[in-house]
Image: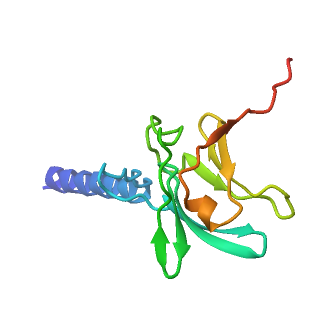
């Protein structure tokens, strides 16, 4: 009888240790499925232009943006050749939309690629320019100092 009790004791002790380990182990990071939306992929930004403030919705995976006008989202006309970053694989958080700095004279809208450091800009003086099919121009990265 003592062998049986000893076996039950060790089995319960082993089961308790296993359950304690599983409860203390951090959960595995859940990966999003390909068709599933990602939290934080879309951002809303207020873009000051002169006396006006435009509200933009920005997709941080593709670099697309929409302008809030008269109670609905308005998509800009695409440039003839498409956007310069069209061949880059969409990844949530890859792109940042940067409006002009307060007090800056030239109204520009910038898209920054956080993976490569490349940046593109286009004029954004008013709503018509924000929605026009104006081409994006690449902005040269800062020169790196030699070490």
Quadrant of the image occupied by residue 17: bottom left
Which residue occupies 68% across, 58% down? 124
Quadrant of the image occupied by residue 137: top right
* Left or right: 102, with 79 as reference point: right
Query: Most extreme residue toward the bottom, as rendered?
Result: 71
* Left or right: 51, with 116 as reference point: right
Rendered position, 140 above or below 66: above
Count of residue discs: 0
If the image is split into quadrants, where does the C terminus sit?
A: top right
If the image is split into quadrants, where does the N terminus sit?
A: bottom left
Rendered position, 140 above or below 130: above
Q: Position of residue 57 (x, y in %)?
A: 53, 65
Rendered position, 36 above or below 68: above
Q: Position of residue 133 (x, y in %)?
A: 53, 51
Q: Position of residue 104 (x, y in %)?
A: 85, 58
Which residue occupies 31% across, 48% down? 34
Q: Position of residue 102 (x, y in %)?
A: 83, 64
**Residue in front for this viewpoint, 74 or 8:** 74
* Left or right: 104, with 130 as reference point: right
Quadrant of the image occupied by residue 50: bottom right
Which residue occupies 43% across, 38% down? 89
* Left or right: 40, with 6 as reference point: right
């Amino acid at each position: 009888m003592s062998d049986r009790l000893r076996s039950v004791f060790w089995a319960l002790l082993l089961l308790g240790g296993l359950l304690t380990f599983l409860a203390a182990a951090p959960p595995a990071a859940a990966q999003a499925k390909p068709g599933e939306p990602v939290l934080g992929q879309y951002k809303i930004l207020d873009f000051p232009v002169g006396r006006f403030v435009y509200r933009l919705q920005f997709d941080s995976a593709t670099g697309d943006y929409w302008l809030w006008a008269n109670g609905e989202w308005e998509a800009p006309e695409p440039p003839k050749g498409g956007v310069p970053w069209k061949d880059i694989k969409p990844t949530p958080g890859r792109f940042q939309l940067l409006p002009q700095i307060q007090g800056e004279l030239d109204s520009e809208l910038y898209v920054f690629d956080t993976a490569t450091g490349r940046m593109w800009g286009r004029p954004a003086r008013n709503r018509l320019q924000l929605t026009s099919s104006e081409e994006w121009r690449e902005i040269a990265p800062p020169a790196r100092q030699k070490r």
